[in-house]
Image: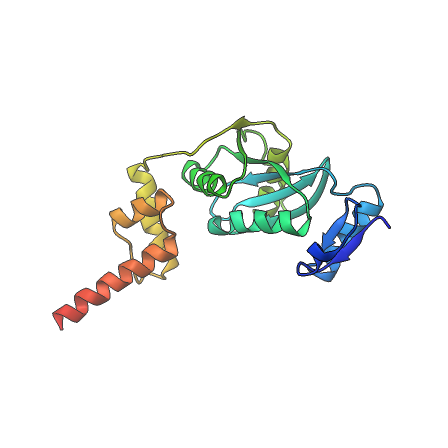
Amino acid sequence: MKVVITTAEEASKIQWEGPHLLIFDDPQGTIDRAINILRGNGHAEPLVIGIDPGRRPGIAVLSGDMVVAVYQVGITEVEPTIRKVAHEYHTSISTIRIGSGARLMTAQIINTLLEGGFKVELVDETGTTPCVGKNIHTSLVRDIIAAINIARIRGEPVGRMEIEPSKGEIRVIQETSRSQSEGRATIPKYLARRVARGEITLDEAIEMHKGHLNGISTETK
C-alpha cells in the first residue's frame, strides 16, 4: 500500500508506518491527492505556503515543485485555511512566505500566523504578478499565480509587525465600510484605525458602529 485514505476521526487509530496518510475531504480533491502520490508527487516533504496579500489573499500550497492546492479567502480566513491544509495533508508546514505588498493587510496576516505558531518569511513580491490575457476577466488568476511565485522565493524571517496606519489608509477603510454596508454606515476614524491594526475585522467595526448609532437613537427617543 502506498496510500491510506481515512477520516479525521479515525486517523489516530490507524497503525501504519507509511508516510502517506490522507484525510478525506471532498471526493475529487481526495482522489487528486492520492493520484499525485502514486505518481511520485506525494506529500512526504513538508509543505511550503505562498500568500499574495490583499483584501482576499491568494494562497498556494506547494509540495516540492508541485502545486497541490490553491485558495482565495478573506484575511481572517487565512490562518484557519492553512491549519486545515496541514491537517488534511497530514504533514508539517515548513515555511509560509508572504508578499511584501499591501502593508497593513500583510502585517495583519503575519501577526495572526505568528500567534498560530507558524514560521513566516517576508518576500519581495516585485515581478510575481503575471500579465493576464485580455480574455481572462478576473484578478483571481493573477492572485493565485502570484502566490505560487511567492512560495518559490526565499524571503527573510519576520517577527510581529506594528504599523501605524496613515490618514489615507484610514480613509480607504472608512470608504470601504460605507460601500460594504451599502451606504448605511461609515465607521469613524478610531474604529477604522483598529481595523487597520488588525484588532477587529471590518464587519465587526460596522456592527459596533451600528450598535452605537442605535444606542444614540434610543436615548433620543
Residue sitting nearer the eye, 144 or 153: 153
Hey, which quadrant is residue 144 in on the image? top right
Q: Residue placed at 52% from the left, 47% from the top?
A: 79
The answer to whether one can see residue 219 in this image is: yes
Quadrant location of the C terminus in the rendered image: bottom left
Residue 56 horizontal/vertical position (percent): 50, 48
| Residue that appears at 79% across and 41% down | 41
Query: Whole-percent x and y of residue 97?
Result: 57, 35
* x and y, in percent, of residue 98 in the image: 54, 36
Tell me: 140 left or right of 38: left
Spot the residue most to the bottom: 221
Residue 136 visible (yes or no) = no
Q: Residue furthest left?
A: 220
Residue 172 rendering spot, x and y as whole percentages: 35, 45
Residue 51 image-quadrant placement: top right
- Image height of 221 relative to 64, above or below: below
